[in-house]
Amino acid sequence: MEASVARHRELGLTDREHELITAGLGREPNDVELAMFSLLWSEHCAYKHSRKLLRRLPTEGPRVVMGPGENAGAVDVGGGWSVAFKVESHNHPSAVEPFQGAATGVGGIMRDIFALGARPIAVLDSLRFGELDSARSRYLFDHVVAGIGHYGNSIGVPTVGGEVHFEAPYEQNCLVNAMCVGLARTERMVRAAAAGVGNVVVLMGATTGRDGIGGASVLASAELDEGDAMRPTVQIGDPFEEKKVMECCLELLADEKLVSLQDLGAAGLTSSASEMASAGGVGIDIDVSRVPLRNPDLEPFEVMVSESQERMLAIVEPDELDAVLAVCRKWETGGTAIGEVAAGDRIRVFDGDELVGDMPVALLVDDCPLYDLEPAEPDRWIYGNGEPLAAVAPGGDPGEALLALLATPTIASKRWAFEQYDSIVGSRTVRRPEQADAAVLQAPEAETAIAVAIDGNGRRVACDPYLGTVEAVLECAQNLACAGAEPLGLTNCLNFGNPEKPAVAWQLDRSTRGLADACGELGVPVVGGNVSLYNETDRGPIYPTPVVGMVGELPSPERLPVAALREGDAIAFAGPLAPDLRGSQLAKLRAELDLGLPGFEPGEVHAAIAAVRDAVRAGLIRCAHDVSDGGLACALAECAVAGGTGIEVDLGPLLGDRGPEAWLFGEGPGGFVLGGEVAAIERLVEAGTAVAIGVASGAEITIAAGPLAIAVPLADAAGAWHSLDAAMEATPA
């Protein structure tokens, strides 16, 4: 008994959980069963500290085709077509082995998409690292970007957008969140539910090895420094194998040869088979001796929990088995019958004729205990590790402050990263990284176009988890509005520290409330997502980082704005922005950190988003860019640098009870920089949609804000904003 108890603790199960498993089985679990329970009852698979909170999120809408509980969410875009999308984390594997961790994160999220029958058409990524002057952060950033590029470029799916932030709390625990978007004929999409007693269970794709045993599930369910000996080998990806598996699966689904399909991700065969059985209300028998192995000496429990990549599990009618296996041979990818759908409600694992595991499906999948959080609001800033020294003094030259902000790695151009990605393969991409705030893709099959964006701001969520999360959702919608797109659905990845600690529990509770309320205000359903907890080391937690990905629809990909001004453009400001320095990038450079963010009215921001979207669709705007990191001055400078033109701007018409410095560098939701022909901008001003503030002209960036004034050469601003290349080549301190 003591040995069993010690074993279950080693696998991450509590004594109480072990007691529940033993009671449910009516006996002690054997090694195979204990391994399977330890993974499916892990935080990563069971969401035992977050599932109750996720019930707050709105999940229904008129365009929702598939919602939470499926491999990915999907929304109807008309003409019999749907867009499938999801975001997931691969944080801890990437912190251990950044290249393979990031690469397999991309591969895993693609499998979620084509498991529905959707062809992946785009990838986006949301990344967080420590400060760039750290050798470790530079190494992680370099290898994560290389891993993303390697996998996406090799498989032929464009990486069309994303974001990168650099903050000290991510030094030991980087975040790698990958989002994939796919397109499918709606009637051909399949769900991940096993059905039909006697149907065959077919394992397709790569062979099964020891790589990744317990990888995503164990690493994502404990603090990263909890026993290095528990770290398994990180999964190893093969994008060329995945390409074959993808084409094989899509052909089989198009020919209606599969009853259902599920990818093998965290917990491998254990999760895929058990979740398919649970969704279908059936049992499944698996014979591990039939599973093609990369390592011939694998034990049965290792076969069941291996997280080897590029594998899919399908349910096939017996009469179709030969045809299915023939298609697998055509694509030169594995296809093996390893079991069958069974009557009853049990998962049974055989090793040849020997029964080595026998568990109720409900106990394995549904009966993991859910825990109530014990939140307590912290009375202080809990991130004292590694905050930068003041780099910008209060009251200094605002021009110098602007250049310092533009050179900040979080704000600076990420050209160094996205030039390693193929953003146009597939010939759908209309707007590429940094051309616009949202990526835009053609979908001629549905006679429409879609826009996609991904956003988050951990620093601001750390200041106020509720308002910071609301801001993240609104910013994503603002980015879509700059492309004239109306949001159809949202996916999220909630990255937090240890939820068993009161401060982190409070952050998670407040953040999920903010996510629910913001989606309710916009009328945008949450169709799926991911929770990544225990992002923490002995140095403390990461910033609470809810990342949101949003898909929107626009009538046409023609005449879309860019984030670049042209010589002679009239410049206007739109939106109810109430800028404030709290939680801003300027406050960070001054080492000023305060809890709390100023309140705002989400309904007013929603109205501004709709007004800008309408103006874009009316063809009145050539340049559209939302105000975010670094404030209005940085947004204006970015548009000027992108267009190669100077600007002459006077913020006088905007100044009110907010100070001039706040209008230059303060942050908050709801602000837009707009540019276009003089007559078109005048129409927006006359309609009350925007306020005229200047013109694009010359070779200098000049911005007047009452008593404060910025005057910097365009070339200096461009050099600051494009400084990331040099920073990555420099030797870290």
Image: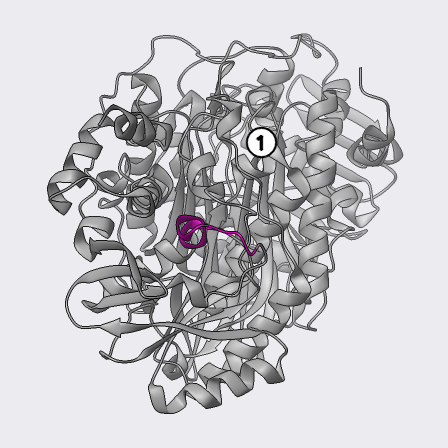
Which scheme is used to colour this image of the protein? one colour
Percent x, y of residue 239: 66, 61
Where is 583 relative to 431, above or below? Answer: above
From this view, report whether residue 5 is shown above or below residue 694.
above
Q: Position of residue 203 (x, y in %)?
A: 45, 69
User: Is residue 693 shown left or right of residue 21?
Assistant: right
Q: Position of residue 691 (x, y in %)?
A: 56, 43
The residue where tag 1 is placed is 174
Residue at 72% of width from left, 60% of height from top?
153
| Magenta residue span | 296-307
Rendered-image quadrant of the C terminus: top right
Q: Is residue 177 left or right of residue 244?
A: left
* Residue visible at 28% across and 63% down in the picture: 61
Q: Nearer the viewer, residue 219 or 461?
A: 219
For disc 1, the neighbor class at 10 Å (few under 14, some 14 to 19, many from 20) is: many
Whether the magenta-drawn stretch holds residue 463 is answered as no
Compared with 589, 573 (above or below) is below
Q: Quadrant of residue 222?
A: top left
The quarter of the image holding the N terminus is: top left
Q: Quadrant of residue 663?
A: top right
Q: Position of residue 608 (x, y in %)?
A: 44, 48
Image side of residue 416 versus residue 35, left or right = right
Q: Amino acid at mark 1?
A: Cys
Q: Is residue 438 above or below residue 545?
A: below
Q: Nearer the viewer, residue 660 or 383?
A: 383
Q: Residue at x 55, y 85 (%)?
A: 327
| Residue 584 figure quarter | top right
Under circle 1, the secondary element is: loop
Number of marks in picture: 1
**Front position in the image: 509 or 346:** 346
Does residue 149 appear to the left or right of 295 in the view shown? right
Q: Nearer the viewer, residue 368 or 5?
A: 5
